[in-house]
Image: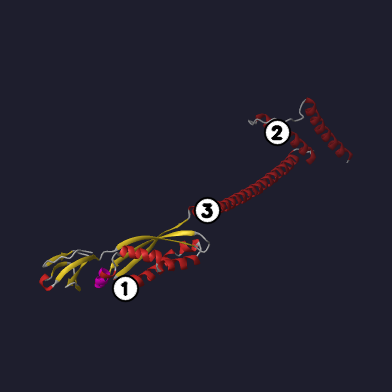
């Protein structure tokens, strides 16, 4: 509001509008810029109103459907309707206080307290924009009659009780820990399955290798026995087999002695055992010869 200026001209600032009276009665609105009026005819500039957007922060306390007391922090952005500036100038003495009074004690407060208790706390967080939109529609109906337009209502924050916030954080942390445990268990399961598959594949390939090795040894022994029997007359396959076995025995002893690994192997080996092996080979040869003579 402004003071009465009984002068011939005046300058109205940008984003403002002047109220001109004539003989104490509203006459017209003065637009921004240089304006003239005639004090001799009873005209004077009574005051000015800003048409800029103003912001008012208010809190409304209520409770949700699940009996959680919350504070709704709303930011109400309003401005004077230029063509209805005379209503805004004359109808409301203090717009800020009257908007607050309407929010706290009027229909708007009743409207919020009638809708929020129908929602759970989670639903309120999810639908806070819908609540703000509904509040905007209700407030526009009332303030529009006084020359004010409600531009926006922003639901800035929803503030539950401190104990409720701690409980919500604990629930969220427990859920995330549970989810992390599930993911960790699945990862361990996949790791164990892959490890078992790798072990099975390794054992399979090892078995194939051993089988091929034994097949190669068998083929080599058979070929050696046949070649020796054909080249040395009077020898049988059994004699050749015995000779190969004693040769492999001494090769094994040699390999064990040349091994670099720290492994101790106890083998019944000595002069008596070597003599026994020689006697066994000799007896085998003699038995084979006597068998041929008998035939």
Tell whether position 51 is magenta: no
Question: Magenta region's main secondary structure?
Answer: helix
Horizontal and vertical percent position of residue 41: 11, 73
Horizontal and vertical percent position of residue 110: 43, 68
Asked whether the beta carbons under mark 3 and mark 2 sit within 8 Å of each other, the answer is: no
Asked whether the beta carbons under mark 2 and mark 1 sit within 8 Å of each other, the answer is: no
Q: Which residue is mark 2?
A: 252
Circle nearer the viewer, 2 or 1: 1
Whether 177 is drawn above or below 108: the answer is above
* Residue name at image x 78 percent, y 25 percent: 271
Circle nearer the viewer, 3 or 2: 3
> Which quarter of the picture shows residue 105?
bottom left
Query: In the picture, which quadrant includes the C terminus?
Result: top right
Whether 185 is drawn above or below 76: the answer is above
Disc 1 versus disc 3: distance between alpha carbons?
45 Å
* Residue name at image x 33 percent, y 68 percent: 150
Q: Which residues are magenta?
A: 83-89
> Which quarter of the picture shows residue 30?
bottom left
Q: Which residue is mark 1?
A: 145
> Which quarter of the picture shows residue 52?
bottom left
Horizontal and vertical percent position of residue 82: 25, 70
Asked whether the beta carbons under mark 1 and mark 3 sit within 8 Å of each other, the answer is: no
Q: Which element type, helix, strand or loop, lies under badge 2?
A: helix
Disc 2 versus disc 1: distance between alpha carbons?
111 Å
Circle nearer the viewer, 1 or 3: 1
């Amino acid at each position: 509001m402004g003071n009465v200026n009984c002068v011939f001209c005046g300058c109205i600032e940008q984003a403002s509008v002047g109220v001109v009276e004539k003989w104490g009665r509203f006459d017209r609105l003065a637009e921004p810029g240089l304006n003239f009026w005639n004090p001799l005819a009873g005209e004077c500039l009574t005051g000015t109103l800003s048409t800029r957007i103003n912001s008012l922060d208010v809190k409304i306390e209520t409770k949700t459907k699940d009996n959680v007391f919350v504070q709704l922090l709303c930011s109400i952005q309003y401005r004077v309707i230029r063509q209805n500036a005379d209503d805004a100038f004359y109808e409301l003495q203090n717009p800020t206080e009257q908007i607050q009074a309407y929010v706290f004690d009027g229909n708007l407060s009743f409207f919020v307290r009638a809708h929020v208790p129908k929602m759970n706390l989670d639903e309120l967080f999810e639908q806070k924009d819908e609540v703000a939109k509904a509040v905007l529609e209700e407030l526009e109906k009332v303030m529009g009659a006084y020359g004010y337009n409600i531009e926006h209502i922003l639901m800035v924050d929803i503030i539950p009780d401190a104990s409720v916030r701690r409980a919500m954080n604990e629930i969220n942390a427990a859920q995330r820990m549970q989810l992390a445990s599930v993911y960790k268990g699945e990862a361990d399961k996949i790791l164990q399955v892959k490890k078992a598959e790798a072990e099975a594949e390794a054992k399979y390939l090892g078995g194939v290798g051993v089988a091929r090795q034994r097949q190669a040894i068998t083929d080599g022994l058979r070929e050696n026995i046949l070649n020796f029997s054909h080249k040395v007359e009077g020898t049988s396959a059994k004699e050749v087999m015995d000779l190969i076995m004693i040769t492999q025995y001494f090769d094994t002893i040699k390999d064990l002695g040349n091994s670099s690994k720290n492994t101790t192997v106890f083998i019944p080996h000595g002069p008596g055992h070597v003599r026994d092996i020689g006697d066994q080979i000799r007896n085998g040869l003699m038995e084979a010869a006597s068998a041929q003579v008998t035939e």
